[in-house]
Image (cartoon, grey):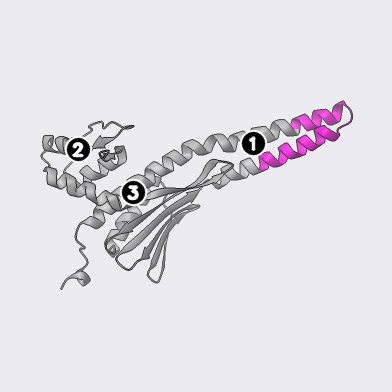
Amino acid sequence: MTERRFNEAEVAAIFERATEAQQTGQRQFPSGEGMTLAQLQEIGREVGISPEQVADAANALERVGSPTARSFLGLPIGVGRTIELDRRLTDDEWERLVVDLRETFDARGSVRHDGSLRQWTNGNLQALLEPTATGHRVRLRTVKGDAQAFMIGGLGMLGVGLISAIFSEGGAAVSSAMSFLAMGGGLFAIGALRVPGWARVRQRQMEQIAGRLTLLAKSPSQDPRDEG
């Protein structure tokens, strides 16, 4: 059986949880192939973290859901991630999550409460907190709306240019059709070339938040209502 490997974001989240308040320094962790639990535990020993703490922190990440994507013409114009938590977040932990969202996405956003539902939004970027039978579920999602608009507009102009080129008569008409085709192709390229890199960044940011949130929920609740 292939040994589980943790990517760069998961490595950072594991050590953040395992050390509680300690810092692991600026060690560069390999991306790409990732690291095994044994490798993580070896690094943990070097900085004074027990293998058991590292294993417990790594196990907490197993609750992080797989990323989701929304595509347009095969391009990722939307990304998301759902995180299932074994317990409910306290008010203080929700506020800490909002701070994390603002810092990670460099966006202030706005907070809204609707009964037991909570939401943080910044344009198309959303974080939804909803209760489940055993805890809380957090849904992270966003859409690159301007890129889709560029691509749709570009396709429209390409269509107009193509029709004009087919039925054009005379040099002026052909020149106009070529202009539509050029502008349409340019608009489509502007939208299409931006989304792959944007999607990778958003997926990595959501992965980091999911790792930190899952590890936070692994610790006991500090809500006095949960005592007794």
Which label's residue is closer to the chain start, 3 or 1? Answer: 1
Instruction: Give the residues in magenta.
Output: 153-179
Amino acid type shown at disc 2: Leu
- Give the residue drawn at x 71%, y 42%: 156
Of discs 2 and 1, which sits in the foreground? Answer: 2
- The answer to whether residue 99 of the structure is visible from this angle is yes
Mark 3, secondary structure of its residue? helix
Amino acid type shown at disc 1: Leu
- Give the residue drawn at x 30%, y 37%: 8
The one of 83 and 12 positioned closer to us in this rendering? 83
Q: Which residue is mark 2?
A: 40
Q: Assess whether mark 1 and mark 2 are in contact (beta carbons under 8 angstroms).
A: no
Residue 7 covered by magenta stretch? no
Q: Which residue is mark 1?
A: 187
Q: Which of the 4 image quadrants contains residue 131?
A: bottom left
Label 1 environment density (alpha carbons within 10 Å; few <14, some 14–19, many ≥20): many
Mark 2, secondary structure of its residue? helix
* Label disc, if present, on residue 107 of the rendered structure: none
Q: Which residue is mark 3?
A: 209
Q: Position of residue 109 (x, y in %)?
A: 43, 54
Of discs 3 and 2, which sits in the foreground? Answer: 2
- Give the residue drawn at x 28%, y 59%: 93
The residues tagged by marks 3 and 1 sit, at their Cα atoms, a distance apart of 33 Å
Provide the major secondary structure of the magenta segment: helix
Say which quadrant the N terminus sits in: top left
The residues tagged by marks 2 and 1 sit, at their Cα atoms, a distance apart of 46 Å
Q: Position of residue 182 (x, y in %)?
A: 70, 30
- The answer to whether residue 19 of the structure is visible from this angle is no
